[in-house]
Amino acid sequence: MSPQKSNTAVGQSAELKPGLVGLAEDWSSDQRAFKNVPWGKAMMWIFLLSDTFIFSVFLIGYMTARMSTAVDWPPVSEIFALSFGGDPIPLVLIAIMTFILITSSGTMVLAVNYGYRKDRKKTTILLLITALMGASFVGMQALEWSKLISDGVRPWENPFGASQFGSAFFMITGFHGFHVSVGVVFLLLIARKVWRGDYDTEKKGFFTSQKGNYEIVETMGLYWHFVDLVWVFIFAFFYLW
Amino acid sequence: MAHAEGQQHPLGVYIKVWILLFVVSGFSYAVDYFNFQGYVRWSLILLFMFIKAGYIISVFMHIKWERWALSAAILVPPSVLLVFIGIMAIESDYTFLTRILYFGPG
């Protein structure tokens, strides 16, 4: 890493020494450890760190249930198969959901980029596309839930195998779906603010009364990518394992 | 200057990673579609998962370009989860054995 000096909206410039020396100096420095990072972004990261632990505990709980059960685990690949007239295709809905979420991550990252270029129109449109895809993800999840419920899967029992399957499934995908839903709401709120030009005029937020600027789009992006990240793990451990 | 105002990078980086994520997700799905089993399945699933997670964190979430003060604060604490996973794996092995012993057939 090369030393760099910069000014941000944070209003502070800080020299960065290469390697561990830079790390040690940042952490031992006066007043703030995270230079060049707006407070909103630092707090989002800390929130995401705590969220990492919540999802990890769910997934570890699922691992424990699955490893310790003496009954066979339900055949996930068959349960989540859908047929469109012909033979059932394994995991097809999950695959579509995965691709939708990745696509929305891509549009989100572009929104962040155009936000910093102060391109109001493109940022708004990209944020709205991201929100739309998030909403369709939740819709497909609802479809999947209702299919499983009509198949007789309950948190305490199911006709396919180990009874822990239902509770792990509803808990993990439910919590993730809730995150996506909250993300959609916030994407819409921020899209509206971008469209209205709040971040160009530095209009003060109603809650924090801080001057708004396009860094909030990046912070929003962090949350959205995290939701995608969690799905990567759920997809691997729950659906493919 | 990357940090002149927030995280600004050329679009090409994002597009490349985006395509890569699509392709790797396709591979993940193929593991199930072609019905690989056993250790091949495990290692392929984990490999593709870590590739995807790594690219999302480092490029999409910009960790690659952040100062170590921030990236270390975020990436180091979750490593304790490895210990937790180890403990629970041992514990569930034990539970499994006792279940076989006391509730199993014969």
Image (spheres, coloured by chain):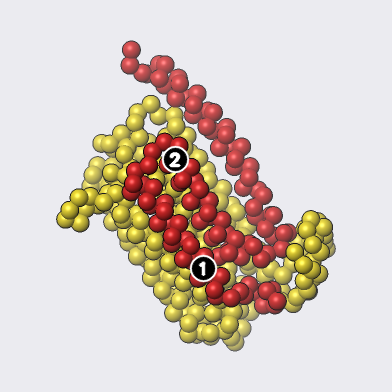
Residue B41 higher or lower than A51, as above or below: above
Residue occupying image coordinates x 53% and y 51%? B50
The residue that mark 2 highlights is B40
Give the farthest residue toward the top: B106
Q: Nearer the viewer, residue A10 or A6?
A: A6
The x, y position of residue B24, in whole percent, is: 45, 57
Residue density around tag 2, few if under 14, some if 14–19, many if 20 or more, within 10 Å? few
The x, y position of residue A180, in whole percent, is: 44, 61
The x, y position of residue A89, in whole percent, is: 26, 51
Chain seen in yellow: A
Q: Nearer the viewer, residue A74 or A151?
A: A74
> Please, which chain is the residue tagged with disc 2 on?
B
Q: Give the position of the N terminus of chain A as an image quadrant.
A: bottom right
Say whether residue A36 is visible. Answer: yes
Q: Colour of chain B?
A: red
The residue that mark 1 highlights is B16
Q: Which of pointers 1 and 2 lies earlier in the amino acid sequence?
A: 1
Give the SS element for disc 1.
helix
Residue density around tag 1, few if under 14, some if 14–19, many if 20 or more, within 10 Å? few
Q: Nearer the viewer, residue A18 or A230?
A: A18
Say whether residue A44 is visible. Answer: no
Residue occupying image coordinates x 68% and y 74%? B2
Give the SS element for disc 2.
helix
> Please, which chain is the residue tagged with disc 1 on?
B
CA–CA distance between discs 1 and 2?
28 Å
Q: Give the position of the C terminus of chain A as an image quadrant.
A: top left
The x, y position of residue A8, in whole percent, is: 71, 76
Disc 2 marks a residue whose amino acid type is Val
Give the farthest residue toward the left: A85
Q: Both on one chain, marks 1 and 2? A: yes
